[in-house]
Image (cartoon, grey):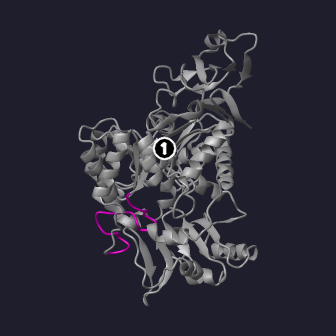
Amino acid sequence: MFAEKVFINGNIYTMNVEASYAEALATIGQKLAAVGSREEVMALAGPETEIIDLKGNTVIPGLIDSHIHTLLAADMFDSESMVNCFNKTKEEIIEAVGQMVKRRQPGEWIQGLGWNQSGWVDTSMPTRQELDAVSPENPVVLLRVCGHAYWVNSLALKLAKIDSNSAAPAGSEIMKDASGEPTGYLTELAGRAVGSCIPQNTKEDIARKFLLIQDYMLRSGVTAYSDKALGVQSIADEPPEQETMEVLDELYSAGKMKVRLNTFLQPGPVMEEMYRKGPQIGLHDGRLTHRGVKMFSDGALGARSAWLLEEYDDRPGHTGSGRLTEEFLQTEMKKAHNAGFQVSLHAIGDAAVKQAIDAHEAVNPQHEDRRFLIEHLMIARDEDFQRLKDSNIIPSMQYVELSSDMNMIEKRVGKKRSMGAYAWRRVLNAGVKIAAGTDCPMDVINPFENMYYGVSRCTIDEEPQGGWHPWESLTRYEVLRSYTLDAAYARFEEDTLGSLQAGKYADFVVIDRDYMNCAVKEIKDITALMTVIGGEIAYQK
């Protein structure tokens, strides 16, 4: 059988250990028919074969983002309806809210995301009065960059019935002033009361947002991703999981969705029904899989809601707190395991990480291959790195998060604990795989910017010189592997994705410079020239 397409004259990094470099590749249907020298591959070319000259450009396997929140991420690009607070001063954000008020009718909600007080001159948490000054008649809710804290105005608090008598749910805070009144700063589940007041996305909104994010992914070389908490939309009280699954089925059936998507739902009625049905793997010709459950053990360091074993250095007496009881966590993990589902647990602080490992060991004492995912794993005790290996746990980590936390991490946890923070090298040295991702919209969707942080441990401005705790940096190969082979392994898909070799899906990206040999600072500027999924050119610059 002749190849349908042959790609020649490439600088191809296959990530195949047995044959790491190639010049050409051929496709038949969705699969790779051959990867090797020009002569070897051209032997499969027939009279109808399409020959595509790569002109010496670099090719890598399609990138896999292991952690995205699609509906939230789409809001980041919606400047008409959302206030973009990323990298803005408090004054700029307040001004942007005021401008949005001018385009709204009284009573209409104003939403935004991305604020980070760590970069402000005054690093204290913002207040409702600052928003009241520009938006007295429109409820306002602004999500922090970490996704775990909310800045709201007085009208939003009133609509949510949050007042001086309100108590926060476990693991959450309703910050109050000296007189006992809410300040307008909420964390974790305390924001749910506000979220329940916000109009929900329609099915049309959901479809538009998935296609919008897919467009950004294809332009960035991302061919597969995992949505960790499907349907999460801002701080909505009940994510529309069933509606979102129906929309995805329609989009894939119509051929509009190309990327390979794995979904993770939160515990609840829809997840219970999924447990009864069992995993749905490889729907729509290998493009869509429902096999995961996602839970949140704690919050975020920036919001001081991450759960620590000892108090925060910059907030004495406060350790954050866990959101899940040991009984609940183990019960849900057992349900998932018994039904054949994969568990993903958000755990940032060392107490949350310990709880995660403890729970996994309790429900899986034989260390069966469950591919349990710990999301973020920002701070861990020394002994827990080896426990990750012993328990066959996969950290799902986001290199970009260090860039936004670098200026505050030692203030939060001190120098000693910071030695176990964002410890990518220690994870790999323990013999543990890393599944890379961005957690977009909490951070940028651009995979190459994320990869730059993994190699350099610097900010986008290349600071500090030599990198923050540079001994924890990774090699280019290790970072790329975490975005390809190891990310595929975390999806149970290492036999079909993650490297370029005959028999696997023909998912790859052509980029504008040599990732392995360009200057480190250039990694963040790499651009996708062509993105191929299942042998189909899904994007071409």
Position of residue 143 in the picture relative to residue 38 (left or right)? left
Comparing 24 with 184, the one in front is 184
Residue 251 picture location, percent across and down: 66, 42
Does dot 1 land on a helix, a strand or a loop?
strand
Residue 436 visible at all: yes
Query: Which quarter of the rendered picture does the C terminus lie within?
Result: top right
Say above or below: 331 vs 434: below
Say above or below: 377 vs 11: below
Query: Which quarter of the rendered picture does the N terminus lie within?
Result: top right
Residue under label 1: 436
Residue 52 picture location, percent across and down: 73, 22
Residue 527 visible at all: no
Comparing 185 with 273, the one in front is 273
The magenta segment: 297-316
Residue 41 picture location, percent across and down: 63, 14
Disc 1 crowd, CA 10 A, few/some/many (<14, 14-19, 20+)? many
Residue 262 picture location, percent across and down: 52, 41
Q: Is residue 442 magenta?
A: no
Disc 1 residue type? Ala
The residue under the point 65% across, 84% down is 136
Characterize the magenta stretch by its predominant secondary structure: loop
The residue under the point 37% across, 40% down is 339
Say above or below: 118 vs 159: above
Comparing 365 with 3, the one in front is 365
Comparing 58 with 433, the one in front is 433
The residue under the point 66% across, 15% down is 3
Say above or below: 34 vs 529: above
